Amino acid sequence: MPVSSNITENNSLLTITIDGKFDRSLMDDFRASYYNMDFDNIVIDMRNTDLVDSSALGMLLNLRKYADNTVNEIKIINCTTHVKRVFEIARFEKRFTIS
């Protein structure tokens, strides 16, 4: 499955994993991975993400907006050089912790 999620037992951390292309085709699955869930922090693991397009950037911004008042931190981790460059161009480091 291209989008999977896991939440810790104490609801402190939601981990979302994206495999392959992060594009419009994942919109419903991505939203379902966090919507109506209770958690303190979010980690988005992009270890196996090949491509991030503009709709993916929009989905991440929607997540940020959705979680703004309830989540302490959103981290995007394990980005490839190409994916990290897309985030740099979009200036996502101002809204997310990226590594």
Image (cartoon, rainbow, N blue to C red):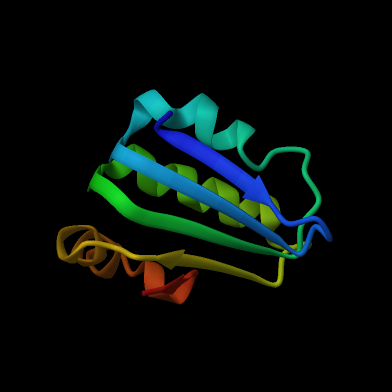
Residue 78 position in % (x across, y down) = 34, 65
Q: Nearer the viewer, residue 18 or 60?
A: 18
**Quarter of the rendering occupied by the C terminus:** bottom left
Above or below, 35 against 93 in this view is above
The residue sitting at the left extreme is 82
Point 58% across, 57% down: residue:
64
**Horizontal arrangement in the rendering, residue 16 relative to residue 89 (left or right):** right
Vertical arrangement, residue 99 with respect to residue 76, above or below? below
Residue 20 at x, y = what percent? 27, 38
In-image side of 54 versus 76 (left or right): left
Locate residue 19: give its quadrant.
top left
| Residue 15 to residue 93: above or below | above
Q: Residue furthest toward the front?
A: 9
Position in image of residue 73 (x %, y %): 63, 71
Seen at 22% across and 62% down, the residue is 80
Q: Is residue 81 left or right of residue 68?
A: left
Quadrant of the frame with the N terminus? top left
- Residue drawn at (35%, 38%), measured in percent from left and top? 55
Report the front residue among 29 and 85.
29
Measuring from the top left, give residue 50's x and y in whole percent: 21, 46
How many discs appear?
0
| Identity of the residue drawn at 25% across and 65% down | 84
Q: Quadrant of residue 83?
A: bottom left
